[in-house]
Image (spheres, rainbow, N blue to C red):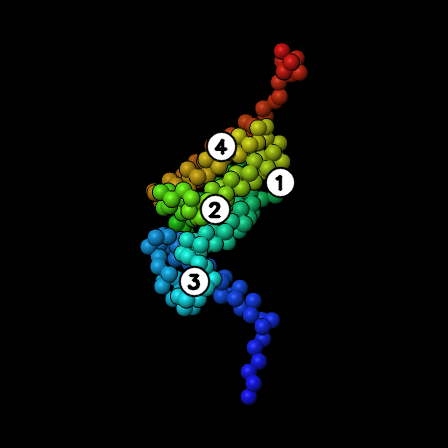
């Protein structure tokens, strides 16, 4: 009896397997670190063979980068949701974003920012795909912050965005070390004050600018 293979469904099945591998790897990497997780553990969690993992990814390094790529847009979208719509004063929105971060970090399985952790764990390999991906993500995130601040009327939005970014990163690092979400709330107050000062900073008179 002839066997018919549905080639039309092959690509969707491959994509499903690839996604399953990424999901499994991401959970293990986030919970246990990049170096300590083996491909065997990833294949077991994903319910696929080790050979299947290497069919979709040439190396563990490529899989690590794929995991970070998969988290790029959702991470920005999460912070966008926390920041909320522009129907409230911008300093209040900034404080709300940090407050939401504090609540998010209070979960028992929270392990900090996966992008920062990857860059730190692989600091000795600056050309590693994951380090490059982490750097690109942080640049895009900072650019997004600057755009939101510019839209809200902050003067020097690029500088203010970088300053808010530093406060975010510092809060995440200290919460991870101390397991104390008050660091996010303190950083949020500083960020809100910074943004508020930027909103009320008036441009110099034309005579002064021309002097």
User: Which of pointers 3 and 2 indicates the residue nearer the eye?
Assistant: 3
Label 2 residue SS: helix
Query: Few, some or many C-alpha atoms within 10 Å of disc 1 (few <14, some 14-19, many ≥20)?
Result: few
- Residue 163 has which mark? 4
Label 4 residue SS: helix
Query: Few, some or many C-alpha atoms within 10 Å of disc 4 (few <14, some 14-19, many ≥20)?
Result: some
- Residue 210 has which mark? none
Task: Give the residue drawn at x 50%, y 54%.
Answer: 70
Disc 1 target residue: 86
- The numbered mark, 4 or 2, whose residue comes first in the sequence reads 2
User: Which of pointers 1 and 3 indicates the residue nearer the eye?
Assistant: 3
Label 1 residue SS: loop
- Residue 54 has which mark? 3
Task: Give the residue drawn at x 53%, y 34%.
Answer: 161
Q: Residue furthest top?
A: 211
For this rendering, which residue is in front, 175 or 56?
56
Task: Give the residue drawn at x 35%, y 59%.
Answer: 38
Q: Quadrant of residue 21?
A: bottom left
User: Which of pointers 4 and 3 indicates the residue nearer the eye?
Assistant: 3
Disc 2 target residue: 133
- The numbered mark, 4 or 3, whose residue comes first in the sequence reads 3
**Figure check: 98 above or below 53:** above
- The numbered mark, 1 or 2, whose residue comes first in the sequence reads 1
For this rendering, which residue is in front, 109 or 122?
122
Q: CA distance from mark 1 to mark 2?
A: 30 Å
Q: CA distance from mark 4 to mark 2?
A: 22 Å
Q: CA distance from mark 1 to mark 3?
A: 46 Å
């Amino acid at each position: 009896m002839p066997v018919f293979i549905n080639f039309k469904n092959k690509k969707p099945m491959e994509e499903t397997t690839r996604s399953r591998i990424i999901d499994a790897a991401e959970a293990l990497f986030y919970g246990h670190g990049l170096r300590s997780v083996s491909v065997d553990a990833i294949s077991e969690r994903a319910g696929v063979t080790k050979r299947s993992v290497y069919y979709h990814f040439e190396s563990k390094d490529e899989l690590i980068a794929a995991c970070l790529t998969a988290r790029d847009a959702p991470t920005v979208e999460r912070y966008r949701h926390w920041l909320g719509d522009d129907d409230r004063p911008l300093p209040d929105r900034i404080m709300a974003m940090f407050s939401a971060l504090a609540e998010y970090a209070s979960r028992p399985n929270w392990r900090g920012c996966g992008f920062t952790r990857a860059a730190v764990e692989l600091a000795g390999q600056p050309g590693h795909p994951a380090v490059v991906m982490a750097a690109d993500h942080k640049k895009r995130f900072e650019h997004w912050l600057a755009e939101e601040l510019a839209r809200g009327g902050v003067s020097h939005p690029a500088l203010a965005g970088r300053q808010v970014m530093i406060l975010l990163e510092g809060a995440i690092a200290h919460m991870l070390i101390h397991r104390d979400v008050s660091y996010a709330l303190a950083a949020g107050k500083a960020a809100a004050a910074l943004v508020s000062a930027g909103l009320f900073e008036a441009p110099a008179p034309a005579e002064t600018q021309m002097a």
